Amino acid sequence: MQQDQTSSQPDASRVGVLTAAVLLTFSLTRVLPAPEFTMSLQLPGFYFAIPVTLGLGMTLLAAGLTASGMDWVLRPHPGLQGTPSIDHWLLPTLTTLVVGATLTLIPDLTAWWLGFAVSAILLLLVFLAEFVVVEPAAPQYAIARAGLTALAYALFLILAVFLRLAGARLFVLVPVLFLGAGLISLRILHLDGTNHWDFPWASGIGLACAQLGAGLHYWPMIPLQMGLALTGVLYALTTLSINVTEGIPARRASVGPLLILAATWGASVFLR
């Protein structure tokens, strides 16, 4: 099917095939035997052990399918003009990793199918939105950008809650939070339409979230409390970086982020 060169809508058949392939990969974790083994490393004074399961393997496979599939979906878009599309498959790949890993923690079949349905909707929305934001002049660009930004923060919240629920050890928690916060903030900052990658801010935000996560790891908190506390920091620092980049004076630029930080941390405190 030949795509209209002025259309901001992707080829429905390509999006359908990609979504179905990713969801099929998720569903296989419920029907196939689930062998598990442990990868371990003994160092002086440290013992590292990481359980490797079928769910982990299938989630990584789904992430790979998403990355390659998004490039396939985006390739006909006239706005790319042969340029790399890595920025547009970054968030979909992270979405696949986070929702796929979260599904592996749901033991109840009914709850799993509900999570599966929500995952399908999230994936479809992020695929469509990423196609739209390829062209900043597209009529739906503002809506798609807002949707991707909201999804990115929700994704980090789910990631932080998942790590707490899974009982991730500190040597896993810190790098995962650093990469998750750094990549998510990097994508949000890149959505300004200038095609600029703000690696210094993204690295600093990732480091701040990882350090906070390391400290909160030892606190007696429920998973949602930790997720809100970390997401508040991510949101505040990302918003601050956007304000500073736009030339807003430092005092005024920090008001909004501080209010959001206070709101999320206040909600976290009163969740018990």
Image: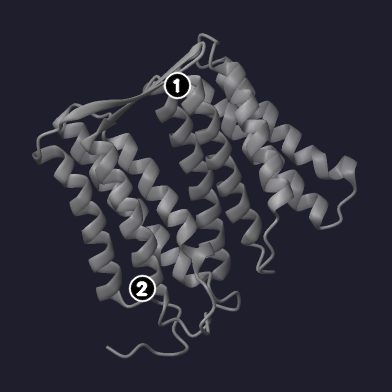
Kindly identify which residue carries mark 2: 72
x 51%, y 8%: residue: 220
Coloring applied to the structure: one colour
Q: At label 1, which amino acid type do we have?
A: Pro
Residue 254's x, y, as percent?
81, 39
Which label number is shown at residue 223? Answer: 1
Q: Look at the numbered disc 1 and give the secondary structure of its residue.
A: helix
Picture quarter containing residue 32?
A: top left
**Image position of 180 with respect to 1: above or below:** above
x 54%, y 33%: residue: 175
Which label number is shown at residue 1? Answer: none
Q: Residues within 10 Å of mark 1 (few under 14, many from 20)?
A: some
Q: At label 2, which amino acid type do we have?
A: Trp
x 53%, y 22%: residue: 226
**Image position of 261 with respect to 187: above or below:** above
Q: Nearer the viewer, mark 1 or mark 2?
A: 2
**Image position of 102 with respect to 20: above or below:** above
